[in-house]
Amino acid sequence: MPVLTKRYPKNCLLAVVDRYLAVVCNMEQVVMIPSLLRDVQLGGHGGQAQMGAPDLYTYFTMLKTIRMDVEHGLLPREEWQAKVVGRKADEAGKEAAEIEEAKEEVPGELDLETQFHVHFSSLHRILTHLTVKAQEVTRKYQEMTGQVL
């Protein structure tokens, strides 16, 4: 796994981002044949699939896509909206409803500092969760291919 060259405090957002990027980069280097990840579930008892749970290939492609967004910045709004429209209509509708609910929950009187801390902690939590998922995909692939050390 690539070694982090910069030193940040443990809970610094930059440290979390660097850790995520390093773990996903390692995952990409280890997973030489991504198609092996199709129809394989991440966890569970005895590898049993949970109904509707994404397979490892789905996680692999999602983690790579998010890495590209983190490294290269966000898509322009028009491209992002086109990407959302390209999804299933019910998914886009559900996402729009969730956004509307979130807007209703956040009072307009929150100051910018409070909003910043809410989003900052959410981003920190999400990146940490995604880092763990990338490590799990890598570990599972290594188990499948006999690369476990």
Image (tube, grey):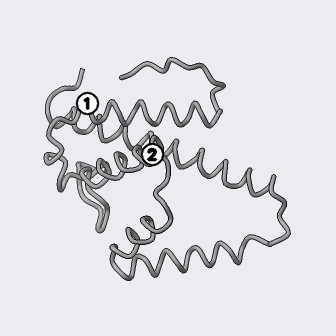
Q: Which mark is residue 82?
A: none
The span from disc 2 to disc 1 (Cα, nearest Å) is: 17 Å
- Residue depicted at 46% across the width and 57% down the height: 75
- Residue depicted at 71% across the width and 74% down the height: 105
Q: Amino acid at mark 1?
A: Gln
Q: Which residue is mark 1?
A: 29
Residue 148: give x, y in percent of width and height: 22, 25
Q: Amino acid at mark 2?
A: Leu
**In which quadrant of the rendered view does residue 124 lie?**
top right
Q: Secondary structure at mark 1?
A: helix
Q: Which residue is mark 2?
A: 130
Question: Is residue 10 rendered to the left or right of residue 85?
Answer: right
Q: Is residue 9 above or below residue 42?
A: above
Residue 130: give x, y in percent of width and height: 45, 45
Residue 65: give x, y in percent of width and height: 36, 50
Q: Nearer the viewer, residue 139 or 72?
A: 72
Q: Secondary structure at mark 2?
A: helix
Question: Is residue 12 rendered to the left or right of residue 136?
Answer: right
Q: Nearer the viewer, residue 22 or 36?
A: 22
Residue 61: give x, y in percent of width and height: 29, 51
Q: Is residue 96 above or below residue 128?
A: below
- Residue depicted at 25% across the width and 39% down the height: 140
**In which quadrant of the rendered view does residue 15 lie?**
top right
Q: Earlier in the sequence, mark 2 or mark 1?
A: 1
